[in-house]
Amino acid sequence: MTSNASSATKHVGKQFAVDDFGPRNFGKLGQIFWVLDQDGLIQPANKLGCGIYRNDTRHMSIWTWLCNGKSLAPLSVSAQEGYGAHAVYANRESEHNDCKLSRQDIKIDRDIVIHADGIFERLRLTSFHPSRASFKMDLVLAQDAADVFHVRNCAFHTRGKMKAPQVHQSRERTAVLFSYKGVDDYFVETAVGFLGKQPQAVTMSRTRVGNEEKIPTATASFEVELDVHETIEIEVQIRPFEENKQSLSGRNKATSRSAVLNTINQMLFEQAHAAADEAYATWRANSVSVETGNALVNSALERAYLDLYMLRHPTKHGEIVAAGIPWYVAPFGRDSAITARQVLTFIPSIARGVIETLAGFQSKVDDLKRVAFVGKIMHELHVGELTRAGILPYTPFYGTSDATPLWLILLADYVLATGDHDFLARLMPNVEAALSYLNMETTRGGGYIRYGFDVNQTLGNQGWKDSGNCIVRRDGSLAVGPIALCEVQSYLYEAWSKLAQVFDRSGNTNLALELRDRASALKASFEKDFWMEDQKFIAMAVDALGQVDEIGSNAGHCLASGILSADQAKAVVNELTSPGLLCKWGIRTLSARARAYNPMGYHLGTVWPHDVAMIVSGMIAAGFTAEAHTVWSTFENLLKEQPDHRLPELVCGFGEGPVVGYPAACSPQAWDTGCLFQMLAAYAGLTLDESTKTVYVKNAALPPSLEYLVLKGVRVGDGVVDLRYKVADKGVLVEAKLEGGVHLVIN
């Protein structure tokens, strides 16, 4: 790995220009997302990372309203829709044109929504002043065109050239074009247009950002006069454009004016919002409907559906799930594969999109700078200025040890559930390339997938726990490369085993037999090399020195695959539910008894809900439902502490007192939106087999607090099944409504 790539990756997730992690509001749809402060605005020189972004570029770094030159007083702000937000403000005491306004004389309703590659904003101004009110509203805007890695302060200061904003007007419309030419010669441009009431003036200034530069700022001013209880509206559109070698401003003033004004959509806010709502309703109707007897869980599920919808992310190879807002609004191989598996039963279209997209970005070359090998599935993709200029290696970057087996598991699960062997046949070149890559890795790794052969390679660790200090021994020393993580070997075992089932059904019996033999050999060596007899637990890794012998949650990911013997699984579950690992909020990443334990450390004792969900589903698969119910109660504890019932990316692992959040956590995070779906499918004992149009319900065991579980619209080929589970004294009662020739088998 070159020094640039090494430096870049070391900074990922570790350093931030953001030094305030207070309340924020998030919204996303497609490639556009916003990060707003708790007042729903983007203030100058904010240190929250606020902005309007398209992919990896911040297009608006200031977006705020003033009344008579004073900030608005927020009364309520809500961004619950995910793709929209609503806020109510009032004016502060001020004077304009001899009209003195008292506090709260003017009510300001503000609505924003993302639709059609733009942001639509509507201000409704209502006067409660005792006489005719005269006041001025200013919209202050600026584009710093910062790469997200600049925003996160990853020690890069390479910058292109900022251009002065251009104002373009016609009789009906006014538009402002912000433009920046990057070091890669691509233009980053944003058009802001006004429909209906037009600004009386647009003035230019410069706003200082930190100690480095002043950025061009535009202020659109509206003179407003209202009678008592009268209301007027101001409509604004913000269009962040995809980076392009050609500027919208063109070569002459006439061409520029026409090009910029034509970017402003004639659709009004009300139409845009209705269209956005309709699009979500259509997507939601094609998903499985889920209801339980627990109001808290139902609220969290509705939040999760909305979050999954807004995290969908288009790429040139298809639609994937972005990892998380605000710092990881980008495709990640591991995160998207795990999320797609979590929701496969409920939203199979997500799985199909992730499979196709990751196949499209599968490496076709060997490239040490990007840790790429032919057949390997990517880790991370970015398209911002620093990546386009070659300063960062994310085109994509392949520094992960687990994305390839996770992609194969997802594909196998999808084909087994849908029976879509034509889809499999189309992707067979990708499957064969991935299997060939894994054969290469296990050959050089002595039977295991390892990383860290080159001390200059980065990331520091290449499992889901990717911080540099998390793979640790009991004496506190760090693992030494090459490193084989226990969970990655479990993923590999599951990938080979499930693909063997797939190839049996497709008639490729020779390949199925070969994969079963490989899986059998892996299981035998894993039991010998990873089992710690003195601790009755699985080593989190095997490295150049032997077993990495500290107790962590990694072993819980080995429960579902079948790589553990029955006795080993029982011992692992016992430790996972012991006071060292299990706390009020879930299962810690590292035992509280460990020398390296730090409940505030990124992977050294914090609790990650997706980690816990994967362990719970593994417990159920291995037959430990009572223990799974115990862990479920910690999920409910965590949900109760979240005002919006959205599972956080991670929390600190303190055992008592109120929950302590992790300051730089993403919200939402993709694999946390999938947690409840994954656990509910596991508790329901649900397996789909499209080849025989059969729904299998095996060992269903709902937590008592759910009372019941209703799944409507589960698709099995061209058939549909509705299922109702009810907690009973001696187990769970299951009722089903079957359509289209679907069969039900209950064990």
Image (cartoon, rainbow, N blue to C red):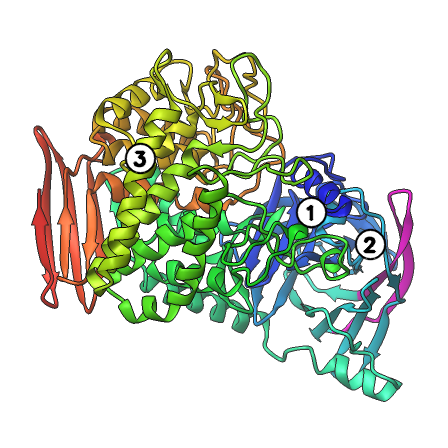
Q: Is residue 612 above or below residue 222?
A: above
What residue is pinned by disc 2? 68
Using residue 82 as the reference point, say whether residue 196 is left or right of it: right
Q: Position of residue 459 (x, y in %)?
A: 63, 40
Rendered view: 243 above or below 688:
below
Disc 1 crowd, CA 10 A, few/some/many (<14, 14-19, 20+):
some
Q: Answer above or below: position of 296 versus 737.
A: above
Q: Is residue 588 magenta?
A: no
Is any part of residue 295 visible from this angle?
no
Residue at horizontal 36%, vertical 19%?
A: 537
Q: Could you tell me which residue is drawn at 57 percent across and 18 percent down?
A: 598
Q: Residue type at mark 2: give it.
A: Asn
The CA distance from mark 3 to mark 2 is 71 Å
- SS for callout 1: loop
Question: Magenta residues, as a range?
Answer: 198-222
The residue sitting at the bottom extreme is: 254
Q: Secondary structure at mark 3?
A: helix
Q: Which kind of residue does numbered mark 3 sit on?
A: Lys
- Residue 104 is tagged as 1
Q: Position of residue 99 (x, y in %)?
A: 83, 56
Marks 3/1: CA distance?
Answer: 70 Å
492, 660: nearer the viewer: 492
- Residue 111: x and y in percent read 59, 59
Residue assigned mark 3? 523
